[in-house]
Image (cartoon, rainbow, N blue to C red):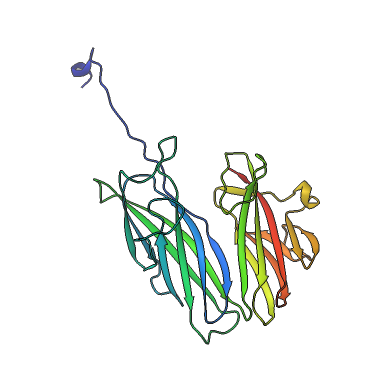
Amino acid sequence: SGSSIAGQNLTRNFGVVRESRFYPDATGQTSSPGTYTFAHWYQPGSLGQVTLSLNPPNPRYTYQVRVDENCDGTFGPGEEWRPFPYTFSVDSTWPREADGSLRACAVEVRALVPAGEPMGATDIALVKAELAWANRPGVVEPDTLTDTLQVAGGEVRLEKRVRNVTQNTPFATTGQGKPGEVLEYCIAYRNLGTQGVNAFVLTDPVPYFTDPLLSVADYGGKAIRWTHGGNTSYLTAASDGDAGEVASGVVRVQVGAVGPGESGEVCYRVRVR
């Protein structure tokens, strides 16, 4: 009651737990038979046990996972490919950033495509990361991302890079940005096969923590820069007469035919929220 606490100083300590992050969504193509590896990052918000699983558990193809649990940039002994579901620990040895937050470590998902799959066959794997908090195992924090795989007649390989435009950093396989800064993503493609690929569509999910820039000065005031066969085109974000669009959080370019040995690149920019 009010009378019982009058004149007393009461202290209450509240702990703030950071939000875990599992990112980014990814898209790829491979041949039949063939394999494709999706690159991701997982940043735990708290200590505990993390279980990686497929939801639903039975996609069209077989998937494996591996985690760089010591965050040293390589997949060493004990970090080999494993079937889903896979559980690992986030304990006091997990690396931390300078601000004390737990570091984001690499997670790779590999799709195994058998022989005999038709060209254009598509599989979508929903990968879930569930963090059960240490000392509070009843509290489970879920994060989900999507890996989309398409079977191509040729062998189109994709390579995604990013740079921080605001800080003028070079392109790399990973990048960081502060709220308000601009990042540029570029996805290079090349047909390594001996057969051409028809009706090739390159799609890339816009990172959920960013907003796409629909008018970029370096892109002629448009949203997408597309280079193919030595020719560069600038495409709008609208679903109009050109080959590109940015819709429902996805960048999409209707590349069309990609002959053996041909290559190209699609770039777009985003602002970090």
Residue at 21 percent across and 18 percent down: it is 5
Task: Give the residue at the far front of this rendering.
Answer: 77
**Whole-percent x, y for residue 235 in the image:** 76, 59
**Whole-percent x, y for residue 236 in the image:** 75, 57
Horizontal side of 221 relative to 96 (left or right) equals: right
Horizontal side of 14 relative to 166 (left or right) equals: left
Could you say which is closer to the camera, residue 13 or residue 114? 114
Task: Give the residue at the far left of this rendering.
Answer: 4
Residue at 62 percent across and 39 percent down: it is 180
Q: Is residue 3 above or below residue 91?
A: above
Task: Give the residue at the far bottom of this rendering.
Answer: 116
Could you say which is closer to the camera, residue 173 or residue 271? 173
Could you say which is closer to the camera, residue 236 or residue 39? 39
Quarter holding the N terminus is: top left
**Whole-percent x, y for residue 158 in the image:** 61, 66
Horizontal side of 134 relative to 178 (left or right) equals: left
Q: Is residue 29 above or below residue 141?
A: below
Residue at 23 percent across and 19 percent down: it is 2
Residue at 66 percent across and 63 percent down: it is 188
- Name the quadrant containing residue 257: bottom right
The image shows a total of numbered marks equal to 0
**Whole-percent x, y for residue 4 in the image:** 18, 18
Q: Is residue 105 above or below residue 87?
A: above
Quarter holding the C terminus is: top right
